[in-house]
Amino acid sequence: MKILKKILYVLLALIVLLLIIAFILPKKYEVSVSKEYNVPVELAFNAVNDMKLQEKWNPWKKMDPEMKIMYGDTTVGAGASYSWEGPVSKKGTFKYLTSERNKEIGTEVIFEGMGDAHGKYIFDKTEGGCKITWTFEGESSIPMNLMNFLAEKYITKDFNSGLENLGELLNDRKSGKYLGYEIKEVIVPAKNYVMNRAEVKFENIAQFYAQNLGSLFQKLQTAGIEMAGMPCGLYFKYDESKQMTDMAAAIPVKEEVAIQDALSYHIDERKALTIDYYGDYKDIGPAHYAIDAYMKDRNILNDAPVVEEYVTDPANEPDPTKWLTKIFYYIAE
């Protein structure tokens, strides 16, 4: 019994000592890690500011592959958010509270049942590119603050891993690889088109092509004019809010021609950005988003129209994964 009492006294003394230490130690924990990249600060900021790209470099996603991520209505800039749930990472919410272009993004993370923490991504220009500093701070209750030094150690390790992953993404984007697509800058020779143009609801685009391309083919055949390439879609305006586009179903020809009940359209030789997209037309959206991101990173503007050239005829190739569509964005000069 005396031995048991001694053990209990020792344990009580240790508990009291730990509680005293816990009251002395700060409840706040802080982490700050930095890494330099050989890319423009605009490119780095845009990548981090797009919350959907977090899945490609966030260290916690890699540690919990079964994590499910649900995005909020906003995914870029201030107000962007996602919630997560996973066997390792449990549940929580991540938000961008502030976003100051090319300078700083303020973050908040809420761990369900455990409280919240705040952080920042700070962007600085350097001689060779830019530096990103990732900070994180929170507060632990007593006696959990005894573990703060371990938390800081593991968070620092995770953040360094995340910044390494981010470097791979930034290098891809610097070389023109976005969302799995390679974007090239090319010179497009002068083009002439015969076309039918109208304002069309997004839901009616396929129907518009079907109705107008057939009639254009007939008119060219009747006039004895040869095609100078595959059918194209020309997009002059694209309004997401109204779900409307000002577009044309078009067929390239060798020179400008006048055909009854059809328009003639000429584009001079121009610099353009281009992507080779393989797949069903209904899934072409991400290829356009890739070019948009490329232009944003480089402060490039484009002139209308955006051209989709439908190289593969579905009547001759039943496999949609082999359908090639060439996309062209003419660079504004």
Image (cartoon, grey):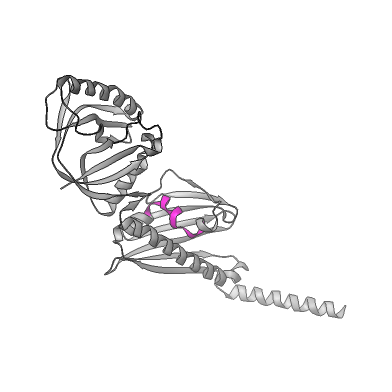
Residue 100 seen in the figure:
no
Along the line of sight, the residue nearer the viewer: 60 or 77? 60
Residue 14 image point, x, y percent: 70, 77
- How many discs appear? 0
Residue 76 image point, x, y percent: 38, 49
Q: Is residue 225 left or right of residue 143?
A: left
Residue 292 seen in the figure:
yes
Q: Is residue 197 left or right of residue 46?
A: left
Residue 70 image point, x, y percent: 49, 46
What segment is highlighted magenta in the picture? 49-60
Residue 249 belongs to magenta span:
no
Against 3, residue 288 (above or below) is above
Q: Residue furthest front?
A: 316
Along the line of sight, the residue nearer the viewer: 201 or 252? 252
What secondary structure do most residues of the magenta stretch adopt?
Answer: helix
Against 98, residue 312 (above or below) is above
Q: Is residue 136 left or right of residue 291?
A: right
Q: Residue furthest right?
A: 1
Residue 323 image point, x, y percent: 35, 37
Along the line of sight, the residue nearer the viewer: 284 or 192? 192
Q: Residue at x 30, y 46 (%)?
A: 292
Q: Residue at x 48, y 53 (%)?
A: 94
Along the line of sight, the residue nearer the viewer: 275 or 140? 275
The image quarter containing residue 245 is top left
Give the quadrant of the N terminus: bottom right
Against 187, residue 101 (above or below) is below
